[in-house]
Image (cartoon, grey):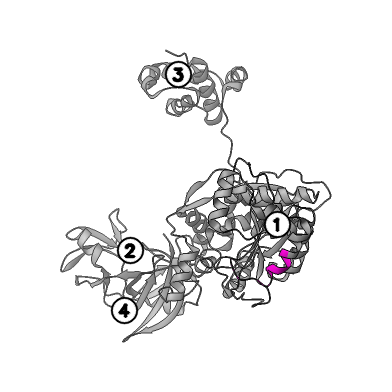
Amino acid sequence: MVDFSKEIKAYALKNAIEFGKADSGKILPKLFQHGLEKEGIKSILPEIEKIVEEVNALASDERNLLFANYEAIVKVKEEKTNELPPLPQIKKGKKPIFRAAPFPSGALHLGNAKTFILNALYAEKYKGKLLLVMDDTIGSAEKPIDSESYTLIEDAFKWLKIKYDKKVIYKSDRLKIYYKYAVELIKKDKAYVCHCTQEELRENRLEGKACGCRILPKNLQLLRWKKMFNMKEGEAILRIKTDMLHPNPAFRDRVLFKISERQHPRVKNKYKVWPTLEMSMAIDDHLLKVTHIIRGSDLLIETDMEKFIWDIFSWSAPVTIHTGLVNIEGAKISKSKAQKEIKSGEFTGWDDPRTWSIQSLRRRGIKPEAIREFVKEIGLNKQNITVPIDTLYAINRKLIDSSTNRYSFIFSPLKLQIQKKPDWKEVSIPLHPSKSETRKIQLNDIYISEQDFNEFKNKEIRLLHLFNINLGKTSELTSIDNKDIPKINWVSSSVPARILTPAGAWIEGIADEGIKSLKPKETLQFERFGFVTFDKITKSKDKTFYDFWFAHK
């Protein structure tokens, strides 16, 4: 058996010095850090008891002297810090420049906002500059630009307290700049206009074979480039010359420009020859003097392509850091699906909770500080990871718990018949467990949820903040003392209320009169239900509802 006597003595002495007396129950868990197996617990317990007894018999000055010989054995648990890890090549006295480059095909959501927030947090950390670059090249027919997205993105940045340079940069305003560098690449014999079909290109890539278009001279390539602007979609593309035997076939002669005849939301039909992401970003990152790029690991090949272009022009490369993708467990995030459902009318808009957009999280009552802290905790993850949405909820709960007042809401309400209840006209209910303020509730009929009735039927329960009853078809008062028995929520009014869940379903019920004094966007807690945000009053059929959006438990 492994001898753990030194480790036992080290932790026993430390425990005795800190608390005046060593506790054997606190020594055992520490030994697992030193290789103790579960199978060895039973045999080592007598040794622990023996050493603890010896240590407790020592005088305090003896413990201190002896501990000096054992202190190095004690493993100190490192406290987790939320500080972002340092970035490489941060030059003293020179402010780094970062960029956030969202593609405006919809509102930002937790998944894609993570990288932009990281760039913003690092810009703040190093007192640098953040550029907002709208990556609004034409995109694809399957993923088109949405004109509303420009406003939604800026709105999200503002709400998230992301500070960026005052002037927003639009790629759709910079086409002539990209054209200039396309011509330079052709003149350097590094790019060519290709008329081959997709099938021919695919075969050539796989075989590592150059097509006939590639070997034409530069002056002819320049003429073919000019003609591209009068061609139809799919008739020609501009490709860069790479090694046709590159280990990654996808890197062989990648596309730099393509023709699209679709109308652009901002510049309409002014342009029809559009750059790819790597072409536009390679030029912009140089001209905008970006020093650090933080982007997703799904863009590794784009980064390699940008470096290839920078080398052609002999430009120094920014520091590029790739972070793994983050899957948010418990949140069904899909920007393309959300856009489709909004257009069909199934979703009410980008602030529908099912979109998981930043706007929808705001409407539910999630704080911007919670989202920023959530991203900060994830940090620069190198691998793809899965993070539960409850992590965000826990952070938000800490931020709002102390400031949110408590109210009551009941779904599937059931009226109680209570015998021998006190003749109280009203009662005072705490606004918050840690506050002295109370609110008065008029006592009329008392309702509880049908679910609570079925669960606690024929048992003694306490109506929260009120009194105790034996629950049944006809309930009977037992006492008013706050006993250690199940506590259930209740309502003594019939104010119609409903709560919209993140899944898009409404939960209808009744709430107490106190909700009538709420202001829109006010977050509160329905006791025993969860945190919600008051949205508005709406009329549905013959009822007027107080509408709430569910935030989290």
Residue picked out by circle 4: 494
Element at label 4: loop
- Real-space Cα distance between discs 2 and 3? 48 Å
Task: Please state which of residues 209 and 114 is positioned toward the viewer in this rendering.
Answer: 209
Mark 2 vs mark 1: give the one in front: 1
Sequence order check: which comes first, mark 1 or mark 4? 1
Please state the extent of the stretch shown in magenta in the rendering: 224-234
Q: Is residue 225 magenta?
A: yes
Name the residue type under label 2.
Answer: Leu
Element at label 2: loop
| C-beta proximity under 8 Å, tags 2 and 3 | no
16 on left or right of 271:
left
Labelled disc at residue 464: 2
Residue picked out by circle 3: 53
Element at label 1: strand
Task: Please state which of residues 54 and 276 is positioned toward the viewer in this rendering.
Answer: 276
548 on left or right of 179:
left
Residue drawn at point x = 43 percent, y = 59 percent:
332
Sequence order check: which comes first, mark 3 or mark 1? 3
- Real-space Cα distance between discs 1 and 4? 74 Å
Name the residue type under label 1.
Answer: Tyr
The answer to whether residue 510 is visible is yes
The quadrant where residue 481 appears: bottom left
| C-beta proximity under 8 Å, tags 3 and 1 | no
Q: Is residue 34 magenta?
A: no
516 on left or right of 100:
left
